Image: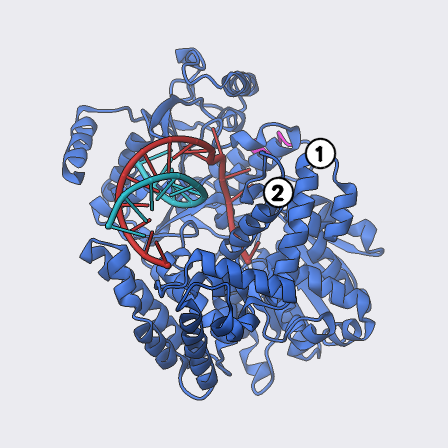
Chain colours: A blue, B red, C cyan
Amino acid sequence: MADAPLLNRAQRDAVTTLSGPLLVLAGAGTGKTRVITYRIAELIKSGIKPPRILAVTFTNKAAREMRERAIALIGKRTRGDKPPEISTFHSLCVRILRRHARLLGYPTDFSIYDRGDQETLARSALRDVRVGHDTLRPGDLLALIGAWKNRGLSPDQATDTAEKEREELGALAFARYQANLKSSGAMDFDDLLLKTEELFTSHPEARFAEASRFDHVLVDEYQDTNGLQYRVLLALAERHRNLCVVGDDDQSIYGWRGAEVAHILGFAKDWTGAKVVRLEENYRSTEPILSLANTLIQHNGSRHPKTLRAMHQGGTPPRFLRFEDEVAESEGIVREIESRLRGNGGPRVMPSDMAILFRTNEQPRAFELELRRAGIPYVLVGGMSFYDRKEVRDVLSYLRVLANPADEVSLLRVINTPARGIGAGSVEVLMKRAVTAGVPLWSVLPQAETDPDLPHGVGARVDAFRQLIERFRARLGREPLAQLATELIATVDYKAELRRAYREPAEAEARFLGVEELVNSIALYEGRAENPSLLGFLEETALAGRDSDTEDERQSHALTLMTLHSAKGLEFLHVYLVGMEEGLLPHARSVADGRGIEEERRLCYVGVTRARETLALSFAKGRTKWGKSRPSIPSRFLFEMRGETERAARAAAAAAAAFTHGAPEAPPPEPQDEKPAKAKPAKGGAKLVRRGQTAGTASKRGERKGGAR
DNA sequence: CCCTGCGCTTTTTTT
DNA sequence: AAGCGCAGGG
C-alpha cells in the first residue's frame, strides 16, 4: 500500500472525526490499519495524552505492527511520554485482572491455560462425570463450554438450559472443569474475558478505575468481536463514548467462536449518533483479482452491500489449477514456485513474496515435504507450534509450577516426568486427599511421607520432589531466569528422559535442541522486558506463543504457509489458494446450515483478497484421508467466482449427495465437462492452466517412496 | 512401578 | 497414517 495517496477523502474523514462513536466499514485492502494509526496520531495532535488512548486488536502480531507504525508516526511528540496502549483483548484483560484478581478470589499470579491445558482439563473432567457408555470428546466439551462462557453462563445456568443429554453431561463436566480451574488458580482464554466482565459487574469501583484510564478506544477487526469482548468494550467505552470500530462484515470468519456480525451490523443502533464512514477504494489487488472477489461475495445474502473499486488497473487474471491428488498439487505448485524464484517467465520473485493458503491444518503436510525437497525456505504459521511440542510443554510445566504450585495441570504433568517412582496409583491417592481436604494437590504433598495409603518409599520420593520445587522457587527473582531454568533441567536430568523416550539418538538430540531454544527465548525475554519476571514470560508464551519476534524475522525471508484464518489482515504479492474442494472449502462440517456456508464463502473471500498481483486457485480430483483415497468435487466457490451459478448449485448438490451417503465409492461427482479446468473462461478472462499427473511426476513420487524407507 | 504393543478412533478454523 | 488408551508382562 506504499503507493496509496497519503489519505483519500473517506480515510481522512475517518481520521479527523475525533469524538463520539464512529464505525469505519473498511473493505479488504482499503487501508484500515493506516486509518487507525493516523487516527491515533491525530488524537495526540489534538491534545490527548498517548496513554489515554486504547487500541485493541485480535492478534499480538497485529498489535505489534500497529504499535510500531504508530510510534513511527508520533515518535517525536511522545518523547518521554508513555506510548498509547495497543494490545489484544486478552492481554488487556490479563493486565486488568492482575490488578484486581484478589477481589475475585484468584491469586495475583494466576496461571493462564492454553488450548492444550484446556484439553487435559476437559479430559479429566469427563472422566469424573462419565455416565453410562456415551461420553463427549474433549473437543466437543470445549466447544460447549466456549459457547456457554460466551453467553456469560455459569455451570449452574448451563445445567438449567441444557436440553439434550449431551448438553446435560457437558454442563456437569463444565462444573468440574471450572472448579478445577479455580482450585488451580488458573484461567483459560475465555475466562480472561469472562472474569474481567465479572469483575466489572461485581465491583463497580474496579470498573470505574479501569474505564477511567482511557478517553478513546479503538477496535480493529470489529466484525470478529464476540459477546464477551463486546461487553468488556462497552464497560470501557460507555462513559466517554469515544469508540471507533473498524471492520468489514464480509471478513467475519470467527462465527464458530461466538463472533457476531450483528455487532458491526448493529453498531449504529447500539451507539446513537454514530457516524459511519465507508472505505471502498482498494489499494491492494489488481482489478481482475478484485472482480473475482466481488463476484464471489455477492452470493452472500446478509451483508452491508458494497463494491470495492480497484485502484490498480491491469494485472494478470487469476488462474485455476487442477491436479490429480494432493501430492500432485503440492508438486505442481512447488515446481512453479521454484521456477518463479529462478526468475523464469517474469520478474524474479522472493520466497517472502509468496504464500500458500489453505483451509485445514492437515493440508500443509504435502507442501512442507515438497518445499523441503526443493530447498525453499518456508514458515508454517500456526498448526503444531513450538509451544505444542512435548519437550517444550514439559519444561514450561516445570516453570509454571515454580510460578504457581497450585497449577494442577502443570503439577500433574511434571510430578513423574522424568519417572521418579511416583506412579499413577500414588498420584490418585494424593488427589483424593486433596479433593477431600478441598485444597490444591500441592498442599497435600508435605503429608505424603506419613500417608499410610502410599506404597512403601513413594512418600519419601514425593517429598524429595516437593523440596526440589521449593528450592528452585526460593531462588526466583534472585538470579537470571534462564540460568535457573538451565539448572532445573540439568537437576531433573531431562536430557536422560529424552534419550529414554526417543530411542533414536538423533531424535533425542533434536528434541533437546527444542529445550535449549526455550531457554534461549527466556534469555531473550529477560533482555527485552522492562521488568522481567517468570510470570511475565509465561504470560507471553501463553498469549503470544504462536507469533514471536523471531517468527517475524523468519517470515521476512521465507515463503508463508498458513490457514485462511491466520491470513486475515495480511497481504502477499503472489497467493496460492489450495484445496478448493467441496468438503474442504466449504468445509464438510459447515455445510449443514446455510449460515455456515456464508462464513466459508467469506473465508474464501479473505483468501482471494490477500493477493496483490497474482492469484492461483487449485483443487485436486482426489484426496487421501486416513490412508484411503477419495474423489473430490471442485468447490462451488470456484464456479460462483466466475458467475457460473448453475454449476455451483450442481457442485453443491453432488457434495451433499456424496456426504450424506458417505460412500467413498460414490459415482464420479460430475460429468467430465463440468470441471473448471475445461470450462470456458468467464467474463474477466480467467486463464486456465492444466496440470495433470505427468510421467515425471509419477517417477518423482516413486523416488520419494523409495528414499523415505 | 514401568514399558511395550495392540486396537480403536479420527472430519475445521484459534486468542 | 497416527495418536491415544488400555492390558499384560517384566
Whether residue A289 sits left or right of residue A146 in the image: it is: left
Residue A185, by quadrant, is bottom right
Q: Is residue A300 left or right of A205 when viewed as pictured?
A: left
Q: Measured from the top left, where is residue A174 in percent x and y?
A: 66, 50
Residue indicated by mark 2: A256
What SS does tag 2 mark? helix
Sequence-wise, which precedes: disc 1 or disc 2? 1
Residue A6, x across and y down, in percent: 56, 62
Q: Chain of mark 2?
A: A
Number of the front mark, 1 or 2 = 1
Q: In 3D space, how far apart are the residues under numbered discs 1 and 2 (Cα atoms)?
A: 20 Å
- Relative to A159, is A107 above or below? below
Residue A419 visible to an observer of this rendering: yes
| Image point (33%, 29%), residue name | A627
Label 1: which residue? A164
Hey, which residue is sitting farthest right in the picture? A272
Disc 1 secondary structure class: loop
Q: Which residues are magenta?
A: A295-300
Name the residue nearer the viewer: A380 or A228.
A228
Q: Residues within 10 Å of mark 1 (few under 14, many from 20)?
A: few
Q: Is residue A529 left or right of residue A110?
A: left
Tell me the amino acid under the disc marked 2: Trp
Residue that appears at 43% across and 82% down: A471
Q: Amino acid at mark 1?
A: Lys
Query: In the image, is residue A298 part of the stretch drawn in magenta?
Result: yes
Residue A296, position as x, y percentages in the image: 56, 32
Q: Is residue A198 above or below residue A215?
A: above
Tell me if I can see residue A55 in this picture: no
Taking depth in this image into account, of A643 and A362 the one nearest to the observer is A362
Residue A459 colored in magenta in the image: no
Q: Nearer the viewer, residue A697 or A33?
A: A697
